[in-house]
Image (tube, rainbow, N blue to C red):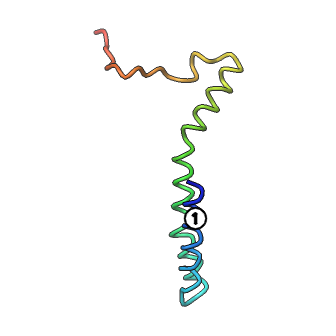
Amino acid sequence: MLIVAIAWIYVVGLMALTESGVLLGIMTFFGYCVLPLSLLFYVGGSGRRRRRNAARAAAQGGAASAVPIDDGAPSRSIE
């Protein structure tokens, strides 16, 4: 995934260099590179953050409330 991001930065950097003005180049770079890649890395790292937070909570003794258990079965409510 990192090699794809580096290649995308290279491509968008070249796109930004061919813009007619400096401001347009900066806007192109941020619009096509920085914002989408930051969103991609944030969403892609959510599982890693969740595991790290669960491990931190388990180390502090709060493992029962750190990670909700989802066994895939539909939940039943008692009414």
Neighbourhood count class around disc 1 (C-alpha, 10 Å): few under 14, some 14–19, many 20 upward: some
In this view, the residue farthest toward the bottom is: 20
> Identity of the amino acid at label 1?
Val
Q: Which residue is drawn at 61% across and 26% down?
A: 54
Count the marks: how many?
1
Q: Which residue lies furthest to the front in this view?
A: 3
Residue closest to the far left? 79
Q: In this view, does 62 lie above or below 42?
A: above
Residue shown at the point (37%, 23%) measured from the top left:
72
Q: Give the percent coordinates (x, y) of residue 69.
A: 47, 20
Residue 5 versus residue 31: which sits nearer the camera?
5
Eyeballing the image, is 54 above or below 5?
A: above
Say which element carries label 1: helix
Residue at the spot of label 1 = 34
- Name of the residue lying farthest toward the top: 78
Q: Is 9 drawn above or below residue 73 in the view shown?
A: below
* Foreground pick, 10 / 68: 10
The quarter in which the C terminus is drawn is top left
Q: Position of residue 18 (x, y in %)?
A: 55, 86
Q: In which quarter of the image is residue 58?
A: top right
Q: In this view, does 45 lie above or below 17?
A: above
What residue appears at the point 57 percent right and 33 percent down from the top-left corner? 50
Say which quarter of the image contains residue 59. Answer: top right
